[in-house]
Amino acid sequence: MAETLELEVATPERELLREQVSELQIPGKNGYLGILPGHAPLLGLLGIGTLTCISGGTKRYYSIHGGFLEVLDDHVRVLADAAEAAEEIDVKRAQAALKRAQEGDINPSLGVDPAEALEAMARAQARLEVAQLNHK
């Protein structure tokens, strides 16, 4: 059995990552999935959260916002609606986005759909969590 698997993370705008990793954890639509080399074939929906991968003994973090996941023959393909590496996240911008989303959810007079406000909050929180993980 292989000791690594190839991880590919792409968004509609760019390829974010392509490298060999020893393990990864990714936000599925209904919870986190752990993937190791030799994992069974899988096709699934992604949720909002933190993708964590280990490459060469180093943990790396990415904020993932929806999309699809394919696992096949020690190759993991992540086709995310949006994704950012931890070091790319602008913390002040993410904090401002979280505040705007919270205000939209709390104040219905702003005309914001509550479901959209909750999703925006989840995205902003995921971005902030990933940025904080990178500084630990």
Image (cartoon, rainbow, N blue to C red):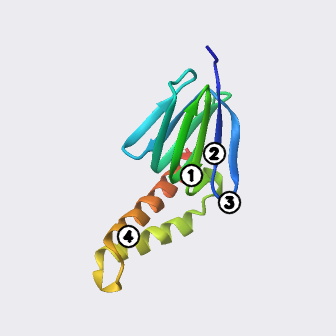
Q: Which residue is mark 4?
A: 117
Element type where label 3 sits in the image:
loop
The answer to whether 70 is drawn above or below residue 85 in the figure is: above
For badge 4, the amino acid type reads Ala
Residue 135 in view (yes/no)? no
Callout 4 touching callout 3 (CB < 8 Å):
no
Q: Quadrant of residue 98?
A: bottom left
Q: Compare residues 1 and 58 and report the one nearer the observer.
A: 1
The answer to whether 32 is drawn above or below residue 64 in the figure is: above
Mark 4 neighbour density, 10 Å: few (under 14) some (14–19) many (20 or more): some
For badge 2, the amino acid type reads Val
Q: Which mark is residue 71?
A: none
Residue 101 lies, in percent from the top left, at: 40, 71
Circle nearer the N terminus (3, 1): 3
Q: Which residue is mark 2?
A: 9
Q: Which residue is mark 1?
A: 80
Q: Which residue is mark 3?
A: 13
Residue 36 in view (yes/no)? yes
- Quick check: 75 left or right of 128? right
